[in-house]
Image (cartoon, helix red, strand yellow):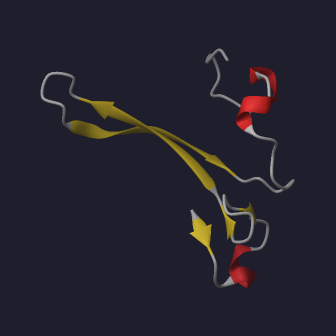
Amino acid sequence: MHFPTHTASKRGFGKAGNGEDLGLFLHPVLAVDADAGGIIGLVDCAVLNRTDGKVADHKQRGAEEKEPRPPGQAP
């Protein structure tokens, strides 16, 4: 989610995916009806605020160096 305006109200937000705008990263988990192919709804959502700057390319990092996972979820 990018917030290119109103920076004063976004104090504490890190940089978004484009490296310029303030923003957050959302990782949604959706429930899907396997038979009908329809979306049932949102099950969970992880919100990440990268305040330490851009991270290295995901292909260059090991699983232990990637963003935290929900409890009980293996890398």
Instruction: Work out which quarter of the rendered image holds the N terminus and state it.
Output: bottom right
**Residue extending furthest toward the right:** 52
Q: Position of residue 40 (x, y in %)?
A: 24, 37
Whether residue 41 is visible here, answered yes or no, is: yes
Q: Is residue 71 above or below residue 47?
A: above
Q: Residue at x 79, y 23 (%)?
A: 62
Q: Residue at x 62, y 52 (%)?
A: 25
Q: Residue at x 74, y 22 (%)?
A: 63
Q: Is residue 64 above or below residue 6?
A: above
8 and 55: which is toward the camera:
55
Please tell me how many numbered marks the rendered image carries. Answer: 0
Is 30 on the left or on the right of 61, as rendered? left
Q: Residue at x 81, y 42 (%)?
A: 56
Q: Quadrant of residue 43?
A: top left
Q: Quadrant of residue 7?
A: bottom right
Q: Position of residue 68 (x, y in %)?
A: 72, 32
Q: Position of residue 75 (x, y in %)?
A: 67, 17
**Residue extending furthest toward the left:** 36
Q: Is residue 32 above or below residue 28?
A: above
Whether residue 67 is visible here, answered yes or no, is: no
Is 74 on the left or on the right of 31, as rendered? right
Q: Quadrant of residue 36?
A: top left
